[in-house]
Amino acid sequence: MRRRGSAAPRAMRNMTQTFVNKFGRKPGRGIRPWLLLPKIIAIAIYLGGLASVLAIWIFSDVAALSLADPRRQFILDLVGSLMVRLVIPALLLALLLGVGLFFQYPRHFLLIRWWQTKMILLAIVIPTSHFFCRWQFTILRHTDQQAASALAARRLAWGLLFALVGSILVVIVGRLKPRLGQNPASVAARLSALTPPPANLASPASPTNREAPPTG
């Protein structure tokens, strides 16, 4: 009976004992969360705005509207306003925040394949869709021929769809971070070979609290 009675207070003392975190991460992750969260919000606004523009353009059926129809001019003004005031600023903000995240670990990102693939997709999707959609929108603004207007309207729908699907693919690659046949250990070895150790580097046996960069 004494053993049972003494075990409970001992267990309570163990539960209330304070342990010092010697090997975990230090509190806070620097500036990364302050860049990552706004980037996610900007990407959501960009994709949502682009999807809204595409839906408005498809369901308004601009290709079937005559040049003198006031609804055609209203749709052109609405789509142009959404692109200039919502979609493009959100895209530029996401790209700017992505550059800030890149410069936290530039050597690491330059070595991993999923980041290289993401940059290639961005270099293809964003400029191609921007200049193509702008070209078709300019035709719609200034043409005086019904056939040319209908053709440009259909092409603009395909250009917006290409931009939306390509942007979603970029987000998927950045979120899943596929290895694409690359060994993370080899990336770490190449990174350590390129990075000279600091002069005040601790001994290998001592733990460090430095946060590792994101791996594939």
Image (cartoon, rainbow, N blue to C red):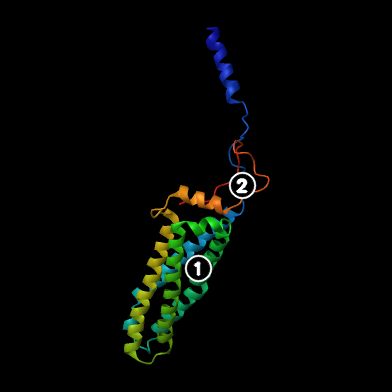
Quadrant of residue 129 in the image?
bottom left
Kind of residue indicated by mark 2: Gly
Element on which disc 2 rests: loop
Residue most extreme to the top: 1
Crowd band around label 2 with a 10 angstrom C-alpha radius: few (<14), some (14–19), many (20+): few
Horizontal and vertical percent position of residue 162: 37, 71
> Residue 11 — which label?
none
Residue drawn at (53%, 55%) of the image: 108
Q: Nearer the viewer, residue 130 or 119?
A: 119
Q: Position of residue 145 (x, y in %)?
A: 35, 91
Does residue 55 show up?
Answer: no
In the image: residue 35, left or right of residue 149: right
* Disc 1 target residue: 91
Q: Quick one: label 1 or label 2, which is nearer the N terminus?
A: 2
Q: Residue at x 43, y 69 (%)?
A: 50
Q: Give the total of numbered labels.
A: 2
Pointer 1 with pointer 2, Cβ within 8 A: no
Identify the image quadrant of residue 144: bottom left
Expressed as whole percent of the image width and height from the top left, the position of residue 81 reads 49, 77
Q: Is residue 90 above or below residue 190?
A: below
Residue 135 visible, this angle: yes
Q: Is residue 149 above or below residue 216?
A: below
Dot 1 amino acid type: Leu
Mark 2 sits on what residue? 28
Toward the right, the furthest residue is 200
Residue 126 drawn above or below residue 40: below
Which structural element holds mark 1?
helix
Indicate whether 29 appears above or below 94. Answer: above
Q: Nearer the viewer, residue 61 or 48?
A: 48
Q: Nearer the viewer, residue 148 or 120?
A: 120
**How many angstroms separate mark 1 from mark 2 (CA)?**
28 Å
